[in-house]
Amino acid sequence: MRENITQTKFTCFHCGDECTSHPILLNDYTFCCVGCKNVYEILSQNNLCDYYNLESNPGINLKNPASKTKFNYLDDEQVQKKLIDFDDEHIQKISFFIPTMHCSSCIWLLENLYKLDVGVNNSRVNFLKKTVSISYKKEITSIRKIVELLTAIGYEPAINLNDIEKQVQKSENRKLSYQIGVAGFCFGNIMLLSFPEYFGLDEFTQAKFSKLFGYLNMVLSIPVILFSAQDYFKLAIKGLRKKHISIDTPLALGILVLFVRSAYEVISQTGIGFFDTHAGLVFFLLIGKWFQQKTFDTLSFERDYKSYFPVSVAVINNGIETTVPVTNLKVGNRIIIRNGELIPADAILLNGEAKIDFSFVTGESIPITKVLGEIIYAGGRQTEQTIELEVFKNVSQSYLTQLWNSEHFAKQNESKIKTFQQTVSKYFTVALLVIAIGSAAWWLMFNPSLALNAFTAVLIIACPCALALSSPFALGTAMRILGRNKFYIKSPEVVEQIAKINTIVFDKTGTITQPSSSQIVYVGENLSEEEKHLIVSLTRNSVHPLSKKIISYFPNVKGESVSQFKEYTGKGLEGKLNGKTIQIGSYHFLFPFVEPMKVNTLNEELATRVYIKIDNNLIGYFQFQHAYRKGLSELIQSLKKHYSLYLLSGDNDAEKDKIMHIFGKETQLCFNQSPIKKLEFIERLQDQHKKVMMIGDGLNDAGALKASDLGISVTENTSHFSPASDVIMDASVFENTLQFINFSKDTTKVIRMSFLISLSYNIVGLSFAVQGNLSPLIAAILMPLSSVSVIVFTTVATILFAKKGGLK
C-alpha cells in the first residue's frame, strides 16, 4: 500500500504545484515545501482558511524563502521617509506593488492582513494596478514587519524607489508583443505551406507533400496554442472554477477544438486540417487585444496625468503673495494655507498655529496640532488661522486624484449601465454556446462535414468583446471632452449619472453670484488704521468669497497672524490680535438674542450685510450688492423646462424678490440655511425618489454635495478643493451647465446605439455561421474588426455630439 502511495503524484494544497519528491503531510493536506506548509499554518491559526475556498490552489510557491536579514534596510529612517505616504502621531500609510497578486483569493487575504498583524488598521487592494495600501499603528508594527509578513504568506512586495510598477507594466506589454510575434510568424508560414492546397497545384498536393506539409503545420501550431493562446485558457479556467462564464470561455473552446480537429486529420491522413485558421484566429485575437490595451493605456495616462483640477495655492515670493496652480509648486516654495484649505504637498510648518484635520486621509476628524518645523503631509486641511509652510516634496497630481476618489467620499450609487453591460455579456456568452452546440448538432445529423465549420464560426464571430468595449470608450471620450471644457469629473461613470438627474438644487453665494463683481460699501463709524488692520488680519484667514471681498476693500492694508482664530461655517469669524477681540459675520452671530439694527442705506432689500464687532462694540457693517453670474437668467429659464429647481442659501432673504424674478414663483427658495439644514433638505428630496444634483461652491455645503446623487463644486480661481463633489466646474463655464447635461445624455444614447450595432452585427454573422457558409478564418478577421468598428463609432459619435452641443 505504501509503495502505491509513493508512486502517486501529489499536488500542493497551497500553490498547486506538483510535489516531485517527499511531500509534506499536514491535516490530510499535501504540501510541496516547508514554506507552503508554514503559510497554511499561519492562515489556519488565524481562521483565514476561506482563502482556499475562493480559488483552488491560490497560493504562491515558497520553496525559496527570503533571508531573515533581507529587509533590515527598512528600519532606516531615510528609506522609510521615501516609502511612507502619510505619517502622524499614531498612524502611518504605505503602498506596495505586489507582482504575485493574481486572483480573488489574493485580494481577500491581502485585505484581511489585520487578522495576521494587530498593528494593521486596514488594507485596500487595487487589483488592476496590483497594489495594496496599508494603514497601520506605528507603535505596534513597522514597515519591516509588514513586509516580512507579506513575504511569509507569498506576497513579497516589489520595493524599488525607481517606480517598479511601470517596469512590470512594460514587461507585461513585452509578453503580449512576443505572443503576437510568435502567432504572426507561425500564421504566415502555415499560410505559405498551405498555398498549394489553396490553388490546387497537383504536383504539390500528392500524398507525400500533403502529409509533410500537414505535419509541418501542426508543429508550427504547437507554440501558438501553448504560448500565444495560453492567456485565453487561463482566464477561461479561472472563470469556470468560480462558476462564472466569461467571454474567454467560447474563445478558448474554439481554439482548442480547431487544434484538436486539425491534429486528428493530419495524423489520420484524412486532410491537412485547419491550422491556418487556428493560427489566424489567435493572431487576430491578439491584435485586437493589443489595440484594446493600447487604447486603455492611453485612457489611463490621460486620467492619471491630464486630469487637471482648477486648484491653486497662494505662494509668497519676495514678500509678494501670488496664486499659482498646484502643479507648478516646486520644492522650496513658501505657501499660505488658510482656514479650510487643503495642503497640496508635503511641507514644513514655518509660521502660525497648525491644527490639521486628516479625515480625508485617515478617516479621523480630530484635528492634530503641529509645531514649528514639523512635517505636515499632503491631504490635511487647516482648521484654524492662516499658516505658512515650505514645500519639501513635489506635489503629486495623482495623489489629488487618489484623494478625490477616496472611499470616504465614494457614492453608494453604482453605474446601472455598467451592470447592464455585464449582464448582457454574461447571457450573451451562454446564448452563444447554446447556438454553437445546437448548430453543430444539427449539421452532424444532416451534413457532418459542415458541423465543425459551423461550430467554430459561431464561437468566433459572435464574441461579445464589442459589447464590453462600447461603454468605456464612449464614457472615456466624454470625460476628455468635458475636461477640455473646464468641467472636471471624478470618473467616467459620473457622465451617465448626470444623465439620470431630474432635480437641481443651487447654492447662492459663490455659486449663482459672482463675488469678484459684487459691490461693497462700508456703513458705520469711521475706521481707524488699527481697526482696518484688525479686520484684514481676521478675514485673511478665510477663503469665503465675502472675506476675500472685504480684503480687497482695503488694498493698502496688510494683515498679520491672529490668535484663537475660529470660523463658524455659515455664520462668521472671530479671533484675537494685540489684546483685542474681533468678530465679523451675520448680526445673529454677533448678537444672537438681539433684533438686527435697521439702517436705511442703499437698496438694502437687495443686499447682504456682514457686521463688525471689536471688543463687544458694534463698529458697523459691510453691505454687498451681489452680481449674478453671466447667463444665469437664460440658464434657469432653460433648466425649468426639464428639471425641478430649488435654491438654498445661508444668507438672509434680503434678495428674495430679485432671485424669485430669476427663478420664478414655482421655484422653492430657502434662506438662512445652515450646512446641516442643506444636507437634510437634499435627503428629503431623495426620500421622494428624486435624483438630485447639488451645485455649490464646496465651502459650507460639502455635506449636501456628498449626500446628493451628483455634486458639482463651482470654483473661481480658488485653492479650495472639495473631494466631496463628483465634478469640479470652472466658474467661467457656469452658463454652459445645460450643455454639459445634454452632452451626458447624448453619450448614454451613443452607448445604447453601439449595443444595437454590435447586436445587429452578431445576428447577421450568426445567420451565415450556423449555415456553415462562413469560413472560420474570415470570422477570425471579422471579430476584431467588429470591436474596432464599435470603438470607432463610439468615439466619433461622442465627438460629433459634443460639437453639435457647442463643446470643443
Image (tube, helix red, strand yellow):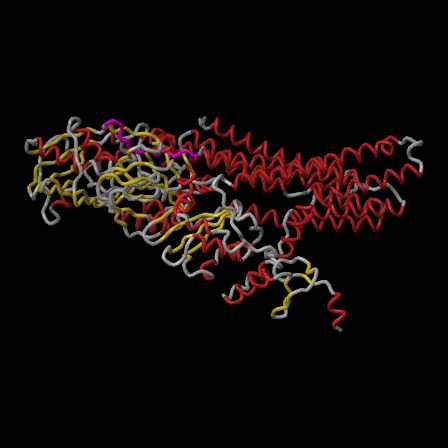
Residue at horizontal 27 percent and vertical 50 percent from the top: 367
Residue 9: image x %, image y %? 72, 62
Residue 349 at what x, y percent from top left? Answer: 27, 41
Q: Hey, which residue is sitting farthest bottom in the picture?
A: 1
Horizontal side of 716 relative to 466 (left or right) equals: left
Q: Is residue 325 left or right of residue 775?
A: left
Q: Nearer the viewer, residue 349 or 613?
A: 349
Residue 200 x/y as whole percent: 89, 32
Horizontal side of 339 relative to 479 (left or right) equals left
91 or 392, which lies in front?
A: 392
**Total of numbered circles in the picture?**
0
Image quadrant where one finds the N terminus: bottom right
Q: Residue 538 colored magenta?
A: no
In front of the other: 31 or 227? 31
Residue 722, quarter of picture: top left
- Magenta span includes 312: yes
Q: Position of residue 56 (x, y in %)?
A: 62, 59
Q: What range of the chain is rendered magenta?
A: 307-318
Measuring 38% from the left and 51% from the top, which residue is drawn there? Answer: 92
Query: From where the camera sits, is residue 96 visible?
Result: yes
**Residue 508, picture quadrant:** top left
On the rendered image, what quadrant is the C terminus found in? top left
Q: Is residue 666 visible?
A: no
